[in-house]
Image (cartoon, rainbow, N blue to C red):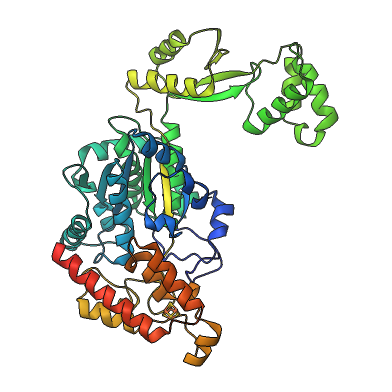
Amino acid sequence: DGGSAAGADDVTLDPWGSASVDDYRKLFEQFGIEAFDDVLPQVPNPHYLMRRGVVFGHRDYGPIADAMANDDPFAVLSGWMPTGDPHIGHKLMIEEIVYHQQQGGDAYALVADLEANSARGLSWAEIDRHTEEYLLSLLALGFDPEEGEIYRQSGNERLQNLAFELGAEANFSEMQALYGFDGETNISHMQSVVTQMADILYPQLDEPKPTVIPVGPDQDPHMRFARDLADRTRYFGVTEAYASFEADPAERVLIRAAYDAIDDDDIRCEDAADYLREHHADEAGTSVLPKLDNAGKEPIRPRVRFLDRNATDEAFEALIDAIDGEKRVFEGHVDTFDLDADAAEELAREVELGHGGYGFIAPSSIYNRFMTGLTGGKMSSSIPASHISLLDDPEDGYDKVKSATTGGRTSAKEQRELGGKADECPVYELYTYLLAGEDDEFATEVYEECVGGERLCGGCKEQAAELMAEFLEDHQEKR
Ligand code: SF4
Protein backbone atom coordinates (compact mmCIF):
# COMPACT_ATOMS: atom_id res chain seq x y z
CA ASP A 1 0.00 0.00 0.00
CA GLY A 2 1.03 3.63 -0.01
CA GLY A 3 2.50 3.53 3.47
CA SER A 4 1.03 4.96 6.60
CA ALA A 5 3.51 7.68 7.40
CA ALA A 6 2.26 11.14 6.66
CA GLY A 7 4.58 13.65 5.08
CA ALA A 8 5.67 15.54 2.02
CA ASP A 9 5.06 14.21 -1.45
CA ASP A 10 8.62 14.56 -2.54
CA VAL A 11 10.96 11.84 -1.57
CA THR A 12 14.04 13.45 -0.19
CA LEU A 13 16.42 11.27 1.72
CA ASP A 14 18.47 13.26 4.15
CA PRO A 15 20.15 11.43 7.03
CA TRP A 16 20.12 14.57 9.18
CA GLY A 17 16.80 16.03 8.04
CA SER A 18 13.32 15.57 9.42
CA ALA A 19 12.51 12.38 7.65
CA SER A 20 9.13 11.46 6.31
CA VAL A 21 8.15 9.36 3.35
CA ASP A 22 4.74 9.67 1.78
CA ASP A 23 4.95 6.95 -0.79
CA TYR A 24 7.27 4.03 -0.26
CA ARG A 25 6.83 2.87 -3.85
CA LYS A 26 8.73 5.93 -5.00
CA LEU A 27 11.75 4.72 -3.06
CA PHE A 28 11.73 1.54 -5.07
CA GLU A 29 11.55 3.41 -8.35
CA GLN A 30 13.81 6.34 -7.57
CA PHE A 31 16.57 4.76 -5.55
CA GLY A 32 16.46 1.10 -6.50
CA ILE A 33 15.46 -0.11 -3.03
CA GLU A 34 13.82 -3.50 -3.55
CA ALA A 35 10.55 -4.68 -1.99
CA PHE A 36 11.24 -6.90 1.03
CA ASP A 37 8.33 -9.17 0.07
CA ASP A 38 10.40 -10.42 -2.85
CA VAL A 39 13.13 -11.81 -0.60
CA LEU A 40 10.91 -12.83 2.34
CA PRO A 41 10.32 -16.44 1.14
CA GLN A 42 14.10 -17.01 1.25
CA VAL A 43 14.39 -15.98 4.92
CA PRO A 44 14.45 -19.13 7.07
CA ASN A 45 12.81 -17.75 10.20
CA PRO A 46 11.59 -14.22 9.49
CA HIS A 47 11.14 -11.70 12.30
CA TYR A 48 7.60 -10.45 12.92
CA LEU A 49 8.57 -6.98 11.66
CA MET A 50 9.47 -8.67 8.37
CA ARG A 51 6.30 -10.76 8.30
CA ARG A 52 4.12 -7.69 8.90
CA GLY A 53 5.72 -5.47 6.29
CA VAL A 54 7.27 -3.03 8.79
CA VAL A 55 10.55 -3.99 7.13
CA PHE A 56 9.39 -2.92 3.68
CA GLY A 57 12.54 -2.74 1.59
CA HIS A 58 16.08 -4.00 1.19
CA ARG A 59 19.25 -3.79 -0.78
CA ASP A 60 20.88 -7.12 -1.51
CA TYR A 61 19.40 -9.04 1.46
CA GLY A 62 19.62 -12.32 -0.52
CA PRO A 63 23.20 -13.13 0.64
CA ILE A 64 22.13 -12.64 4.29
CA ALA A 65 19.14 -14.96 3.87
CA ASP A 66 21.42 -17.53 2.21
CA ALA A 67 24.01 -17.24 4.98
CA MET A 68 21.30 -17.80 7.63
CA ALA A 69 19.95 -20.80 5.73
CA ASN A 70 23.40 -22.37 5.26
CA ASP A 71 24.94 -21.47 8.61
CA ASP A 72 27.56 -19.35 6.87
CA PRO A 73 29.20 -16.34 8.51
CA PHE A 74 27.36 -13.02 8.28
CA ALA A 75 27.10 -9.90 10.38
CA VAL A 76 24.60 -7.27 11.45
CA LEU A 77 25.47 -3.74 12.50
CA SER A 78 23.45 -0.74 13.48
CA GLY A 79 23.78 2.20 15.76
CA TRP A 80 22.35 5.41 17.07
CA MET A 81 23.24 8.98 17.47
CA PRO A 82 22.90 9.52 21.21
CA THR A 83 20.94 12.75 20.99
CA GLY A 84 17.96 11.94 23.21
CA ASP A 85 16.25 9.17 25.12
CA PRO A 86 15.74 5.84 23.33
CA HIS A 87 12.13 5.53 22.13
CA ILE A 88 9.90 2.90 20.59
CA GLY A 89 11.27 3.69 17.11
CA HIS A 90 14.75 2.67 18.31
CA LYS A 91 13.30 -0.52 19.71
CA LEU A 92 12.57 -1.76 16.17
CA MET A 93 16.16 -1.34 15.14
CA ILE A 94 17.48 -2.96 18.31
CA GLU A 95 15.17 -5.92 17.79
CA GLU A 96 16.51 -6.34 14.28
CA ILE A 97 20.09 -6.46 15.57
CA VAL A 98 19.10 -8.96 18.25
CA TYR A 99 17.14 -11.07 15.75
CA HIS A 100 20.13 -11.40 13.41
CA GLN A 101 22.38 -12.15 16.36
CA GLN A 102 20.04 -14.95 17.42
CA GLN A 103 20.03 -16.28 13.86
CA GLY A 104 23.80 -16.75 14.12
CA GLY A 105 25.16 -13.41 12.89
CA ASP A 106 28.07 -11.48 14.42
CA ALA A 107 26.32 -8.49 15.94
CA TYR A 108 27.65 -4.94 16.32
CA ALA A 109 25.94 -2.04 18.05
CA LEU A 110 27.63 1.29 17.76
CA VAL A 111 27.19 4.67 19.33
CA ALA A 112 27.60 7.43 16.75
CA ASP A 113 28.99 9.90 19.25
CA LEU A 114 31.24 11.70 16.75
CA GLU A 115 28.22 12.31 14.56
CA ALA A 116 26.14 13.53 17.50
CA ASN A 117 28.90 15.96 18.33
CA SER A 118 29.64 17.23 14.81
CA ALA A 119 26.22 17.11 13.12
CA ARG A 120 24.04 17.94 16.12
CA GLY A 121 26.44 19.85 18.30
CA LEU A 122 25.77 17.93 21.53
CA SER A 123 28.23 18.27 24.38
CA TRP A 124 30.23 15.20 25.41
CA ALA A 125 28.48 15.14 28.81
CA GLU A 126 25.05 14.98 27.17
CA ILE A 127 26.33 12.32 24.76
CA ASP A 128 27.61 10.19 27.67
CA ARG A 129 24.29 10.37 29.44
CA HIS A 130 22.25 9.39 26.36
CA THR A 131 24.75 6.65 25.50
CA GLU A 132 24.19 4.98 28.83
CA GLU A 133 20.42 5.09 28.36
CA TYR A 134 20.69 3.52 24.90
CA LEU A 135 22.98 0.77 26.05
CA LEU A 136 20.72 -0.22 28.92
CA SER A 137 17.79 -0.58 26.52
CA LEU A 138 19.97 -2.49 24.04
CA LEU A 139 20.85 -5.02 26.73
CA ALA A 140 17.33 -5.15 28.13
CA LEU A 141 16.01 -5.98 24.66
CA GLY A 142 18.26 -9.02 24.43
CA PHE A 143 21.57 -8.00 22.83
CA ASP A 144 24.22 -10.50 23.93
CA PRO A 145 27.38 -8.48 24.71
CA GLU A 146 29.50 -11.60 25.22
CA GLU A 147 28.88 -12.69 21.64
CA GLY A 148 28.51 -9.29 20.05
CA GLU A 149 30.49 -6.05 20.08
CA ILE A 150 29.45 -2.63 21.30
CA TYR A 151 31.62 0.36 20.54
CA ARG A 152 31.71 4.12 20.49
CA GLN A 153 33.07 5.75 17.35
CA SER A 154 35.36 8.04 19.32
CA GLY A 155 36.98 5.18 21.23
CA ASN A 156 37.65 2.82 18.35
CA GLU A 157 41.06 3.26 16.78
CA ARG A 158 40.71 0.54 14.13
CA LEU A 159 37.51 2.21 13.01
CA GLN A 160 39.17 5.61 12.79
CA ASN A 161 42.03 4.23 10.74
CA LEU A 162 39.61 2.59 8.35
CA ALA A 163 37.67 5.86 8.11
CA PHE A 164 40.88 7.65 7.19
CA GLU A 165 41.63 5.14 4.45
CA LEU A 166 38.09 5.33 3.06
CA GLY A 167 38.35 9.11 3.08
CA ALA A 168 41.08 8.78 0.48
CA GLU A 169 38.53 7.19 -1.87
CA ALA A 170 35.83 9.81 -1.29
CA ASN A 171 35.69 13.40 -2.45
CA PHE A 172 33.72 16.55 -1.78
CA SER A 173 31.63 16.56 -4.96
CA GLU A 174 30.22 13.16 -4.11
CA MET A 175 29.22 14.32 -0.65
CA GLN A 176 27.70 17.38 -2.23
CA ALA A 177 25.62 15.24 -4.59
CA LEU A 178 24.59 12.70 -1.95
CA TYR A 179 24.04 14.90 1.08
CA GLY A 180 23.71 18.43 -0.24
CA PHE A 181 26.89 19.56 1.54
CA ASP A 182 28.20 22.96 0.55
CA GLY A 183 30.96 25.39 1.34
CA GLU A 184 29.49 26.00 4.80
CA THR A 185 29.55 22.34 5.83
CA ASN A 186 32.11 21.82 8.54
CA ILE A 187 35.00 19.40 8.14
CA SER A 188 34.03 17.34 11.19
CA HIS A 189 30.63 16.66 9.68
CA MET A 190 32.36 15.30 6.58
CA GLN A 191 34.70 13.31 8.79
CA SER A 192 31.67 11.86 10.57
CA VAL A 193 30.39 10.64 7.18
CA VAL A 194 33.56 8.69 6.41
CA THR A 195 33.45 7.39 9.97
CA GLN A 196 29.98 6.07 9.25
CA MET A 197 31.23 4.46 6.06
CA ALA A 198 33.86 2.78 8.21
CA ASP A 199 31.16 1.68 10.70
CA ILE A 200 29.25 -0.03 7.91
CA LEU A 201 32.34 -1.93 6.72
CA TYR A 202 33.82 -2.49 10.19
CA PRO A 203 32.36 -6.04 10.67
CA GLN A 204 34.40 -7.11 7.65
CA LEU A 205 37.77 -5.88 8.90
CA ASP A 206 38.94 -9.34 9.90
CA GLU A 207 37.24 -11.26 7.14
CA PRO A 208 34.81 -10.31 4.38
CA LYS A 209 31.26 -11.48 5.01
CA PRO A 210 27.74 -10.44 4.05
CA THR A 211 26.69 -7.69 6.46
CA VAL A 212 23.22 -6.25 6.93
CA ILE A 213 22.54 -2.76 8.23
CA PRO A 214 18.97 -2.16 9.49
CA VAL A 215 18.13 1.51 8.88
CA GLY A 216 15.36 3.98 8.21
CA PRO A 217 14.96 4.94 4.56
CA ASP A 218 16.40 8.39 5.31
CA GLN A 219 19.76 6.68 5.88
CA ASP A 220 19.84 5.21 2.39
CA PRO A 221 22.38 7.75 1.02
CA HIS A 222 24.86 6.28 3.50
CA MET A 223 24.18 2.79 2.17
CA ARG A 224 24.67 3.81 -1.44
CA PHE A 225 27.92 5.56 -0.57
CA ALA A 226 29.22 2.65 1.53
CA ARG A 227 28.42 0.11 -1.18
CA ASP A 228 30.25 2.26 -3.66
CA LEU A 229 33.27 2.70 -1.42
CA ALA A 230 33.40 -1.03 -0.66
CA ASP A 231 33.62 -1.62 -4.37
CA ARG A 232 36.17 1.12 -4.97
CA THR A 233 38.63 -0.26 -2.44
CA ARG A 234 38.70 -3.64 -4.16
CA TYR A 235 41.93 -4.68 -5.88
CA PHE A 236 40.17 -6.19 -8.88
CA GLY A 237 36.91 -5.70 -10.70
CA VAL A 238 35.34 -8.75 -12.33
CA THR A 239 33.14 -8.30 -15.42
CA GLU A 240 32.06 -10.28 -18.42
CA ALA A 241 33.62 -9.37 -21.76
CA TYR A 242 33.42 -10.49 -25.38
CA ALA A 243 36.51 -9.10 -27.08
CA SER A 244 39.73 -7.36 -26.10
CA PHE A 245 38.22 -3.84 -25.90
CA GLU A 246 36.36 -2.37 -22.91
CA ALA A 247 32.57 -2.18 -23.09
CA ASP A 248 30.16 -0.73 -20.56
CA PRO A 249 27.23 -2.83 -19.20
CA ALA A 250 24.73 -1.53 -21.80
CA GLU A 251 27.19 -2.21 -24.62
CA ARG A 252 27.82 -5.72 -23.33
CA VAL A 253 24.08 -6.45 -23.45
CA LEU A 254 24.05 -5.49 -27.15
CA ILE A 255 27.12 -7.56 -28.00
CA ARG A 256 25.59 -10.51 -26.16
CA ALA A 257 22.36 -10.08 -28.16
CA ALA A 258 24.32 -10.15 -31.43
CA TYR A 259 26.37 -13.13 -30.28
CA ASP A 260 23.25 -15.12 -29.35
CA ALA A 261 21.37 -14.16 -32.50
CA ILE A 262 24.18 -15.02 -34.93
CA ASP A 263 24.93 -18.31 -33.16
CA ASP A 264 28.09 -19.11 -35.11
CA ASP A 265 31.36 -20.24 -33.47
CA ASP A 266 33.34 -18.15 -35.89
CA ILE A 267 31.56 -14.85 -35.22
CA ARG A 268 33.76 -11.73 -35.63
CA CYS A 269 33.33 -8.23 -34.28
CA GLU A 270 32.42 -6.95 -37.74
CA ASP A 271 29.59 -9.52 -37.98
CA ALA A 272 28.18 -8.32 -34.67
CA ALA A 273 28.44 -4.72 -35.93
CA ASP A 274 26.46 -5.62 -39.08
CA TYR A 275 23.81 -7.34 -37.01
CA LEU A 276 23.43 -4.42 -34.60
CA ARG A 277 23.33 -1.89 -37.44
CA GLU A 278 20.41 -3.78 -38.89
CA HIS A 279 18.48 -4.61 -35.71
CA HIS A 280 19.49 -2.15 -32.98
CA ALA A 281 20.75 0.90 -34.86
CA ASP A 282 19.30 3.38 -32.35
CA GLU A 283 20.83 1.91 -29.20
CA ALA A 284 24.12 0.78 -30.74
CA GLY A 285 24.65 3.93 -32.88
CA THR A 286 27.49 5.93 -31.49
CA SER A 287 28.80 3.79 -28.67
CA VAL A 288 29.40 0.14 -29.39
CA LEU A 289 29.46 0.20 -33.20
CA PRO A 290 32.72 2.14 -33.54
CA LYS A 291 34.35 -0.26 -31.07
CA LEU A 292 33.19 -3.33 -33.00
CA ASP A 293 34.15 -1.78 -36.34
CA ASN A 294 37.55 -0.94 -34.98
CA ALA A 295 38.07 -4.52 -33.76
CA GLY A 296 37.10 -5.78 -37.23
CA LYS A 297 38.00 -9.43 -37.67
CA GLU A 298 38.72 -10.12 -34.00
CA PRO A 299 36.64 -13.14 -32.94
CA ILE A 300 33.92 -12.61 -30.34
CA ARG A 301 34.41 -15.00 -27.45
CA PRO A 302 32.63 -14.69 -24.10
CA ARG A 303 35.11 -14.44 -21.24
CA VAL A 304 35.46 -13.24 -17.67
CA ARG A 305 37.68 -10.20 -17.25
CA PHE A 306 39.68 -9.15 -14.19
CA LEU A 307 40.29 -5.41 -14.10
CA ASP A 308 43.21 -4.08 -12.12
CA ARG A 309 41.74 -1.37 -9.85
CA ASN A 310 43.90 -0.92 -6.77
CA ALA A 311 46.11 -3.99 -6.95
CA THR A 312 49.83 -3.77 -6.30
CA ASP A 313 52.03 -5.12 -9.12
CA GLU A 314 52.71 -8.11 -6.94
CA ALA A 315 49.03 -8.86 -6.42
CA PHE A 316 48.33 -8.48 -10.13
CA GLU A 317 51.13 -10.96 -10.95
CA ALA A 318 49.84 -13.34 -8.29
CA LEU A 319 46.37 -13.19 -9.81
CA ILE A 320 47.73 -14.01 -13.28
CA ASP A 321 49.60 -17.00 -11.83
CA ALA A 322 46.54 -18.19 -9.95
CA ILE A 323 44.27 -18.33 -13.02
CA ASP A 324 43.98 -21.86 -14.35
CA GLY A 325 43.27 -22.57 -17.99
CA GLU A 326 43.41 -20.23 -20.95
CA LYS A 327 44.08 -16.58 -20.17
CA ARG A 328 45.23 -13.44 -21.94
CA VAL A 329 47.08 -10.70 -20.18
CA PHE A 330 46.64 -7.09 -21.27
CA GLU A 331 47.74 -3.78 -19.80
CA GLY A 332 45.47 -3.37 -16.76
CA HIS A 333 43.33 -6.45 -17.27
CA VAL A 334 43.41 -10.22 -17.68
CA ASP A 335 40.87 -12.19 -19.71
CA THR A 336 40.11 -15.74 -18.71
CA PHE A 337 38.17 -18.28 -20.74
CA ASP A 338 37.69 -21.24 -18.40
CA LEU A 339 36.36 -19.58 -15.23
CA ASP A 340 32.76 -18.63 -14.49
CA ALA A 341 31.92 -15.31 -12.87
CA ASP A 342 31.43 -16.69 -9.33
CA ALA A 343 34.72 -18.60 -9.36
CA ALA A 344 36.43 -15.47 -10.70
CA GLU A 345 34.96 -13.33 -7.89
CA GLU A 346 36.17 -15.82 -5.34
CA LEU A 347 39.66 -15.96 -6.83
CA ALA A 348 39.90 -12.16 -6.99
CA ARG A 349 38.97 -11.90 -3.31
CA GLU A 350 41.38 -14.65 -2.30
CA VAL A 351 44.33 -12.97 -4.04
CA GLU A 352 43.36 -9.58 -2.59
CA LEU A 353 43.18 -10.96 0.94
CA GLY A 354 46.53 -12.68 0.47
CA HIS A 355 48.10 -9.32 -0.46
CA GLY A 356 46.88 -7.03 2.27
CA GLY A 357 43.49 -5.99 0.86
CA TYR A 358 40.13 -6.09 2.67
CA GLY A 359 38.13 -7.88 -0.05
CA PHE A 360 34.97 -6.12 1.15
CA ILE A 361 31.58 -7.50 0.16
CA ALA A 362 29.12 -4.71 -0.64
CA PRO A 363 26.99 -4.29 2.52
CA SER A 364 23.25 -5.08 2.47
CA SER A 365 20.48 -3.14 4.15
CA ILE A 366 16.89 -3.47 5.29
CA TYR A 367 14.53 -0.51 5.65
CA ASN A 368 11.87 0.06 8.28
CA ARG A 369 8.78 2.11 7.78
CA PHE A 370 8.66 5.24 9.90
CA MET A 371 6.20 5.11 12.75
CA THR A 372 3.33 7.57 12.69
CA GLY A 373 3.25 9.89 15.68
CA LEU A 374 0.58 9.23 18.30
CA THR A 375 -0.77 12.71 17.64
CA GLY A 376 -0.90 12.04 13.87
CA GLY A 377 1.77 13.29 11.49
CA LYS A 378 5.28 12.27 12.11
CA MET A 379 6.75 10.82 15.27
CA SER A 380 9.19 13.36 16.59
CA SER A 381 11.34 13.47 19.69
CA SER A 382 10.66 17.19 19.93
CA ILE A 383 6.91 16.50 20.43
CA PRO A 384 6.78 14.31 23.58
CA ALA A 385 3.09 13.38 23.10
CA SER A 386 3.85 12.05 19.60
CA HIS A 387 6.17 9.28 20.75
CA ILE A 388 6.80 6.98 23.67
CA SER A 389 10.21 6.96 25.22
CA LEU A 390 11.48 3.67 26.59
CA LEU A 391 12.07 5.63 29.80
CA ASP A 392 8.52 7.00 30.06
CA ASP A 393 6.76 6.22 33.28
CA PRO A 394 4.34 3.35 32.45
CA GLU A 395 1.42 5.53 33.52
CA ASP A 396 2.50 8.27 31.13
CA GLY A 397 2.81 5.65 28.38
CA TYR A 398 -0.71 4.53 29.20
CA ASP A 399 -2.01 8.11 29.03
CA LYS A 400 -0.25 8.86 25.74
CA VAL A 401 -1.86 5.84 24.07
CA LYS A 402 -5.24 6.75 25.53
CA SER A 403 -4.96 10.25 24.02
CA ALA A 404 -3.67 9.05 20.66
CA THR A 405 -5.30 9.94 17.35
CA THR A 406 -7.10 6.97 15.77
CA GLY A 407 -8.42 5.91 12.41
CA GLY A 408 -11.89 5.70 13.91
CA ARG A 409 -15.12 7.16 12.54
CA THR A 410 -16.96 10.12 14.03
CA SER A 411 -19.53 8.01 15.92
CA ALA A 412 -19.80 4.47 17.24
CA LYS A 413 -22.76 3.93 14.92
CA GLU A 414 -20.73 4.92 11.89
CA GLN A 415 -17.81 2.78 13.04
CA ARG A 416 -20.09 -0.27 13.29
CA GLU A 417 -21.46 0.41 9.81
CA LEU A 418 -18.31 1.35 7.93
CA GLY A 419 -15.52 -0.12 10.05
CA GLY A 420 -12.46 1.77 11.30
CA LYS A 421 -9.52 2.83 9.14
CA ALA A 422 -6.83 0.63 10.67
CA ASP A 423 -4.39 1.45 7.85
CA GLU A 424 -4.43 5.09 8.93
CA CYS A 425 -4.45 4.47 12.67
CA PRO A 426 -1.38 5.10 14.88
CA VAL A 427 -2.89 2.81 17.53
CA TYR A 428 -3.10 -0.07 15.07
CA GLU A 429 0.52 0.63 14.17
CA LEU A 430 1.43 0.21 17.83
CA TYR A 431 -0.17 -3.24 17.78
CA THR A 432 1.71 -4.37 14.66
CA TYR A 433 5.07 -2.75 15.47
CA LEU A 434 5.22 -3.62 19.12
CA LEU A 435 2.23 -4.64 21.21
CA ALA A 436 1.28 -7.86 19.39
CA GLY A 437 4.86 -9.11 19.70
CA GLU A 438 5.29 -12.48 17.98
CA ASP A 439 1.53 -13.07 17.90
CA ASP A 440 0.54 -12.58 14.23
CA GLU A 441 -2.94 -13.92 14.88
CA PHE A 442 -3.61 -11.23 17.47
CA ALA A 443 -2.41 -8.48 15.10
CA THR A 444 -4.66 -9.82 12.33
CA GLU A 445 -7.58 -10.08 14.74
CA VAL A 446 -7.25 -6.42 15.75
CA TYR A 447 -7.14 -5.42 12.08
CA GLU A 448 -10.11 -7.48 11.04
CA GLU A 449 -12.25 -6.52 14.00
CA CYS A 450 -11.45 -2.86 13.34
CA VAL A 451 -12.17 -2.75 9.61
CA GLY A 452 -15.17 -5.05 10.14
CA GLY A 453 -16.74 -2.60 12.61
CA GLU A 454 -16.71 -4.97 15.59
CA ARG A 455 -13.96 -3.07 17.40
CA LEU A 456 -14.56 0.42 18.76
CA CYS A 457 -11.74 2.85 19.44
CA GLY A 458 -12.36 3.36 23.16
CA GLY A 459 -11.90 -0.31 24.05
CA CYS A 460 -9.17 -0.76 21.49
CA LYS A 461 -7.14 2.10 22.96
CA GLU A 462 -7.72 0.86 26.49
CA GLN A 463 -6.30 -2.55 25.53
CA ALA A 464 -3.34 -0.95 23.72
CA ALA A 465 -2.66 1.43 26.62
CA GLU A 466 -2.61 -1.43 29.13
CA LEU A 467 -0.25 -3.45 26.93
CA MET A 468 1.98 -0.42 26.53
CA ALA A 469 2.16 0.15 30.30
CA GLU A 470 2.99 -3.53 30.81
CA PHE A 471 5.70 -3.38 28.16
CA LEU A 472 7.28 -0.27 29.70
CA GLU A 473 7.20 -1.71 33.17
CA ASP A 474 8.80 -4.95 32.04
CA HIS A 475 11.41 -3.18 29.90
CA GLN A 476 12.39 -0.82 32.69
CA GLU A 477 12.74 -3.68 35.14
CA LYS A 478 15.08 -5.41 32.70
CA ARG A 479 17.07 -2.22 32.30
FE1 SF4 B 1 -7.52 2.27 15.48
FE2 SF4 B 1 -8.47 0.48 17.16
FE3 SF4 B 1 -9.97 2.52 16.41
FE4 SF4 B 1 -9.41 0.61 14.69
S1 SF4 B 1 -10.57 0.40 16.54
S2 SF4 B 1 -9.32 2.78 14.29
S3 SF4 B 1 -7.33 0.05 15.31
S4 SF4 B 1 -8.09 2.62 17.59
Residue 225 in view of the camera? yes
- Is residue 203 shown above or below 57? above
Residue 394 image point, x, y percent: 21, 76
- Is residue 132 shown above or below 317? below
Q: Residue at x 83, y 28 (%)?
A: 277
Residue 438 image point, x, y percent: 34, 60
Rendering quarter of residue 295: top right
Q: Is residue 412 left or right of residue 100?
A: right
Rendering quarter of residue 397: bottom left
Query: Which residue ends up furthest to the right in the rendered image?
Result: 278
Query: Split into 4 quadrants, where in the image is the N terminus?
Result: bottom right
Q: Is residue 40 left or right of residue 70?
A: right
Which of 245/180 is in front?
245
Query: Split into 4 quadrants, where in the image is the C terminus?
Result: bottom left
Q: Residue at x 33, y 76 (%)?
A: 464
Rendering quarter of residue 354: top left
Q: Residue at x 56, y 19 (%)?
A: 304
Which of 407/377 is in front?
407
Residue 479 in view of the camera? no
Residue 271 image point, x, y percent: 80, 18
Which of 357/184 is in front?
357
Where's ligand 1: which quadrant? bottom left
- Is residue 356 shown above or below 384? above
Q: Residue at x 53, y 48 (%)?
A: 38
Residue 225 image point, x, y percent: 44, 44
Numbered disc total: 0
- Is residue 141 shown above or below 258? below
